[in-house]
Image: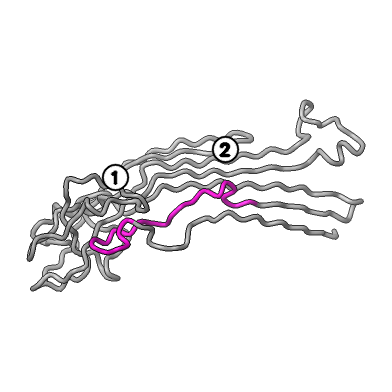
């Protein structure tokens, strides 16, 4: 067995941030390339090259490479200005003023995934992390019910390494919109009454954790889990404080 600790990574990343009074947020873009699974392991141990005689084949996108990430936050409080019901009084002001609405939007591209073929290579200690061979079929042209095209990869020839690249598949995009609405009611000087409503993934947009990239299995191209990320939920909170 040959073991080497050499590795190289190149990261280019840019960020634009805004600090608006009511709509702060930012967007990121970049690219990260490495010749090892930096920050992660394969098979529970150190990162292992598929073929130690061809380390150049390990150079690919980093596991954490995410080309685009957008974060936006917005907040508005009713009655916060002359033109926003600040001068309302009486029961109109009691009902409409001092409600705070906040929202957060997260939109990101997927992170890289590696196609794998579960087989033990004779004469080596490598089991289950062999990469398959690439075909001319497009990866993204998946048949109905799947997210990846199983015909894009085939098992490698006998006693040979596959030519599919490490981290050559883009995982599912990420999207989530959370909102909240709340207000504090002041009853006399020593008693406050809080109302708050929080909504997670308010649009109920389906987001999957990852794709199954194991070749020659019936679940190839499906989500790796039956559990979806960020199912929508609503939480209502009532709190009273005595000061």
| Element carrying mark 2 | strand
Residue 139 at what x, y percent from top left?
Answer: 26, 47
What residue is shown at x 57% (from left), y 37% (from top)?
Answer: 24
What residue did someone put label 1 on? Answer: 141
Residue 184 at what x, y percent from top left?
Answer: 79, 49
Give, as a single range, the part of the protein colored magenta.
199-221
Residue 162 lies left or right of residue 235; in this view the side is left
Which quadrant, please, contains the C terminus?
Answer: bottom right
What residue did someone put label 2 on? Answer: 24
Q: Quadrant of residue 155?
A: bottom left
What residue is shown at x 14% (from left), y 53% (from top)?
Answer: 163
Residue 142 lies left or right of residue 199; in this view the side is left
Question: Residue 97 magenta-drawn?
Answer: no
Residue 194 at what x, y percent from top left?
Answer: 78, 53
Q: Label 1 neighbourhood size at 10 Å, few (<14), some (14-19), many (20+)?
A: some
Whether tag 1 and tag 2 are in contact, CB under 8 A, the answer is: no
């Amino acid at each position: 067995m040959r073991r080497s600790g050499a590795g190289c990574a190149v990261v280019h990343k840019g960020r634009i941030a805004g600090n608006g009074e009511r709509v702060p947020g930012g967007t990121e873009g970049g690219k990260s390339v490495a010749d090892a699974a930096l920050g992660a392991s394969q098979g529970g141990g150190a990162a292992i090259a598929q073929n130690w005689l061809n380390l150049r084949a390990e150079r690919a996108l980093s596991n954490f490479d995410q080309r685009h990430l957008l974060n936006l936050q917005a907040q508005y409080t009713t009655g916060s200005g002359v033109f926003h019901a600040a001068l309302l009084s009486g029961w109109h002001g009691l009902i409409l003023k001092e409600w705070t609405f906040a929202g957060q939007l997260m939109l990101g591209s997927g992170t890289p995934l590696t196609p794998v073929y579960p087989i033990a290579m004779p004469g080596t200690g490598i089991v289950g992390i062999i990469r398959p061979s690439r075909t001319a079929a497009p990866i993204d042209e998946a048949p109905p019910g799947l997210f990846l095209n199983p015909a894009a990869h085939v098992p490698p020839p006998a006693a040979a390494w596959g030519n599919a690249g490490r981290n050559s598949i883009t995982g599912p995009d990420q999207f989530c919109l959370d909102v909240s609405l709340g207000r504090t009611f002041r009853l006399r000087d020593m008693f406050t009454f809080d109302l708050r409503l929080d909504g997670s993934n308010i649009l109920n947009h389906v987001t999957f954790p990852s794709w199954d990239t194991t070749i020659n299995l019936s679940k190839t191209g499906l989500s790796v889990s039956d559990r979806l990320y960020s199912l929508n939920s609503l939480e209502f909170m009532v709190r009273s404080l005595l000061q």
